[in-house]
Amino acid sequence: MPETGERTQLADEAAQANPYSVIAESNFHEPPPAHRELAERIANDPRMHDHVEGFLSCMQCGICTSACPAARFGDYSPREIARRALDGDPTLLTDDTVWLCFYCYTCQSRCPRGNSVAVINQVIRGLQVEEGYGIKHVAMFTAWAEQFYDKGIGGTPQIFFADRVEALGPKWRRFIERRDDLRDELGLGSMFPSSAAAAEMRTIMDETGFRERLLSMGAWGGDAAHRP
């Protein structure tokens, strides 16, 4: 077996012959022990069930980024997200760019390894919300979630109404204003589930902690005593 000095010389010669060997050695290594926990949390999340092998075998080819619509118009790179997730990079828990993904799953359909950065983003977003950082990104949807809890069906947050009127025109506003009357004229009945079905949904959401999470995001004005 070569001595230490001889091994160093051989390594230097190999690096000169193939400079990419140094890049591979320094960048494609196992995550540091302190960061493995985050990579394992992502890999072990139930949503990753069909994508774990692809996630762990990501070869950083960049096909996901080259095909990603969000990457064309924003400071977002699926390839970078995949690499940092594999490294267990803790800064992912405070990275706003993961919220630029809109789940078109182009990355998943193009990946030769079967990885899905869209699903990785779902997991990271959930972790951000659990840590408290991501709440600012989902707080606007509490109005939708409140209605889902109260009536068993979601609604569009009011914050989007002005943009929708601008995009779809006054006909859309008139339709929304007359929607219930139109349903009655067509004999469609209420668009909401029955009170019994809504009560069953509330039971499920209470037991799974859905209501408590909504309260933590300021739903119902943070009133813990709220009951529909």
Image (cartoon, rainbow, N blue to C red):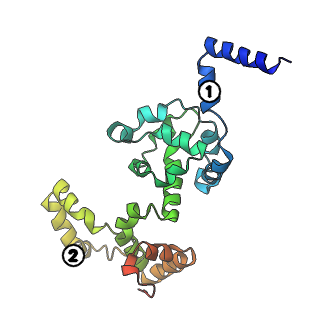
- Residue under the point 67% across and 39% down: 30
Q: Is residue 109 visible?
A: yes
Element class at badge 1: helix
Label 1 sits on residue: 24
**Residue nearest the observer in this picture, 111 or 73:** 73
Q: Estimate the spatial distance between the alpha carbons at disc 1 and disc 2, rounded to whole Å.
A: 65 Å
| Mark 1 or mark 2: whose residue is earlier in sequence | 1
Nearer the observer, disc 1 or disc 2? 1
Instruction: Quadrant for the N terminus, please.
Output: top right
**Residue nearest the observer in this picture, 68 or 88:** 88
Amino acid of disc 1 = Ala
Element class at badge 2: helix
**Residue nearest the observer in this picture, 170 or 26:** 26
The reply to whether the C-beta atoms of the residues labelled 1 and 2 are less than 8 Å apart is no
Query: Percent position (x, y) of residue 100?
Result: 38, 48
- Residue under the point 57% across and 78% down: 207
